Amino acid sequence: MRYGTPSAIVAAAVLILAPGAARVGAQGQAEQFTPEYRELRRSYDEKHTPKIEAPDSVKRGQWFEVTVTVGAGSAHPSLAEHFVRYIALYKDGAEIARVYLHPVFSYPKAVFTIALDEGGTLRAVAEPTHSAAWEGSKKITVTR
C-alpha cells in the first residue's frame, strides 16, 4: 500500500508542524477568555442563576435532599450548541458534590443527598457553555 512519495510526506509534515501554525489559532482562542468571561457571576439572571431548594434548617448528621435547578426564573436550554456543563454544590468554600450534564439529553437539574455537621451557606455553581459559571446560594441552619 503506497501513501505517496517520501518527498510528498515530508512536505505535508512541514506544513502541519510549521512553527507558529498552531499558535495562531490558540492565541485567538486565548484572547476570548478575558477576566470578565472567567469571573463567577453572582448577579441574578432568570436562565442562568442556579436555584437551590433545601430545608432552611436540618438536624446535625441527618441526610436531606438539595435540588439545584439552573434557571431561577425558567429552565436553562439544553441544546447541542448551548447547555450546562456541570452543577457543583458547595458548603461555604468546600465543594461537596458535582454532576456533569450532557447536551440535549440532560435537564439542567441535579438532586444531591447530603448531611451537615454545622450550619453555613450552600452554594450552587453551574457553568454553561457560553459564559462563565453562575452562582446561587442559600443559608442553612443545623440543629442538634
Image: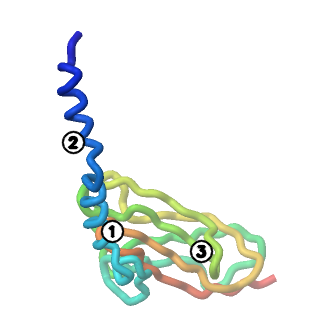
Quadrant in the picture for residue 43: bottom left
Quarter of the C terminus within the rendering: bottom right
Residue at 37%, 53% (x, y): give it.
102
Alpha carbons under labels 2 and 1: distance apart: 23 Å
Look at discs 2 and 1 and give the one toward the viewer: 2
Quadrant in the picture for residue 141: bottom right
Looking at the rendered structure, the kind of residue marked 2 is Leu
Which numbered circle lies on residue 90?
3
Residue 13 horizontal/vertical position (percent): 26, 36
Alpha carbons under labels 2 and 3: distance apart: 48 Å
The residue that mark 1 highlights is: 30
Residue 139 left/right relative to 46: right
What is the number of callouts on the image? 3
Helix, strand or loop for disc 1 = helix
Helix, strand or loop for disc 3 = strand
Q: Nearer the viewer, residue 62 or 76?
A: 76
Residue at 39%, 61% (x, y): give it.
85
Marks 2 & 1, CB-CB < 8 Å contact: no
Alpha carbons under labels 1 and 3: distance apart: 29 Å
Question: Neighbour class for label 2 at 10 Å: few (<14), some, many (≥20)?
Answer: few
Q: Mark 2 or 3 closer to N-term? A: 2
Q: Mark 1 or 3 closer to N-term? A: 1
Looking at the rendered structure, the kind of residue marked 3 is Tyr
Quarter of the N terminus within the rendering: top left
Residue 31 horizontal/vertical position (percent): 29, 73
Residue 69 horizontal/vertical position (percent): 42, 71
Residue at 55%, 85% (x, y): give it.
138
Residue at 21%, 18% (x, y): give it.
3
Which numbered circle lies on residue 15?
2
